[in-house]
Image (tube, rainbow, N blue to C red):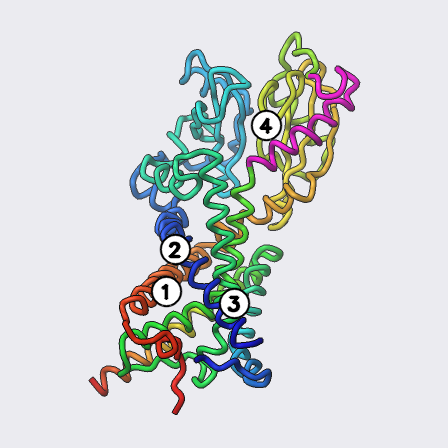
Amino acid sequence: MTTASLRAWRFVHTWTSLICTLFMLLLCLTGLPLIFHHEIDEWLGAQAEPAAIQAGQAPLPLARIADAALAQHPGKVMQYVGFDQHEPRAVFAILNASAGAHPNDSVTKVYDSHTAAPLGPPMSGFMMVMLRLHVDLYAGLPGKLFLGLMGTLLVAAIVSGVVLYAPFTRRLAFGTIRTGRAPRTIWLDLHNLLGIVTVAWLTVVGATGVINTLSEPMINHWKATELADMVASQGQGQGQQQPRAPASLLPVDRAVEQARAAAPGMTVSFVAYPGTAFSTSRHYGVFLRGDTPLTARLLQPVLIDAETGAVGATRHLPWYLTALLVSQPLHFGDYGGLPLRIIWALLDLVSIVVLGSGLYLWLARRGRTAPAALTLRPAPTA
Amino acid sequence: MTRVPKAAEGRRVFRIPLLVGLTSLAGLLSALFFEGPGWVAAWIGLGLPLALVAWHVGLALIRTERTG
């Protein structure tokens, strides 16, 4: 590497960081409460706790949950019903004006799986604000893609930061903080130490976050290709044409039974009623998951004819949806118990200091009037 | 001007960061594949960067206390 390329890396690091810093600070700050959303919502009393299970008590059929949800929301229809991976006592129901209505207009409510008692909304208003700010800045798909772009800049800032780490620390033992020197030097050392030890974590969280921003286009692509193929393979309708609606609706629990028989050993994650984005006008879409830590994240769709109960097409998810589902725990940090989530939060706080110190260093350097050659001297020459 | 480091220097500078990075990655993956011991491995692997921060910042604070 030449001195000229070093200067180029510096330029890349400065500008990729500066452009994304404000948004990354927002993502770090909103992500912090999201790590503990369950505990915070419990503390806020946003959701009622499920009743303790009596001995020998079995979960209710899903149809009973759906009935409870429909009774609570007259005029609406069921879109989805499913289970919370972390809270086996909770069943969520998503309702809307019609099966094909837009997700933004849907209502999600949580019910006790054993009593069908309503437990309230899935999250508090505060947590919803944090989530929207974190996911799409209240701007829908363009907001998501914008944050994805910012995440890509973050990854570029990390890579260029690693390249710059060597020239800036070559004369120092690892982790040295030159106390007693100018604040700028102390913050540079802190920036280098905190940045370099969190590189792997922040790269993974940043890259998986970027993958998540693409979830909507990925799901749309899957629906247009794979799901359309699954529908077409049923011999009803040609190509992308939707098959005719069922004359009478098979109970949801029958559809689940059929799907489980077709995919033994798998657990139901959620069921899409006919006519939604994840089913056809004639089929239930039953989404099953595995039981190991990794396969519990992966879904396998099975189409069940909503009139006859016949098992329709089933196939594994394509690689890009597998990547999306595996990237989610790596972004959320919700796959290693409470200690892992505490570590996630602490690493998030360290990242805030890295972002803040980087911004400070840029401002401090701009404020100096010394010639550029002097301000570019990071390591002591003594 | 910042001098471009030699290859040997680069290896020395990156020895600990590389170790921390690989340990973090092993921790990130272990909980994804194994429950129980995998979780503990994740806590240790991702706890290492935090421990290093605490150690070096702690040392710096003690030094400041003594001299200041």
Q: Chain of mark 3?
A: B
Q: In the displayed structure, does residue A139 sit left or right of residue A200?
A: left
Q: In the displayed structure, does residue A89 sit left or right of residue A281?
A: left
Above/below status of A321 relative to A253: below
Q: Residue at 61% of width from left, 37% of height from top?
A: A218
* Gap between marks 2 and 4 measured at Cα: 40 Å
**Residue of label 1:** A358
**Residue of label 2:** A21
Q: Position of residue A319 (x, y in %)?
A: 68, 44
Label pair 1/2, CB-CB below 8 angstroms:
yes
**The stretch drawn in magenta includes residue A226:** yes
Do dots 2 and 4 share one subunit?
A: yes
**The stretch drawn in magenta includes residue B14:** no
Q: Secondary structure beneath disc 1? A: helix
**Residue of label 3:** B45
The crowd level at tag 2 (other Cα within 10 Å; few <14, some 14-19, many 20+) is: many
Extreme residue in the front direction: A371
The crowd level at tag 3 (other Cα within 10 Å; few <14, some 14-19, many 20+) is: many
Do dots 3 and 4 share one subunit?
A: no
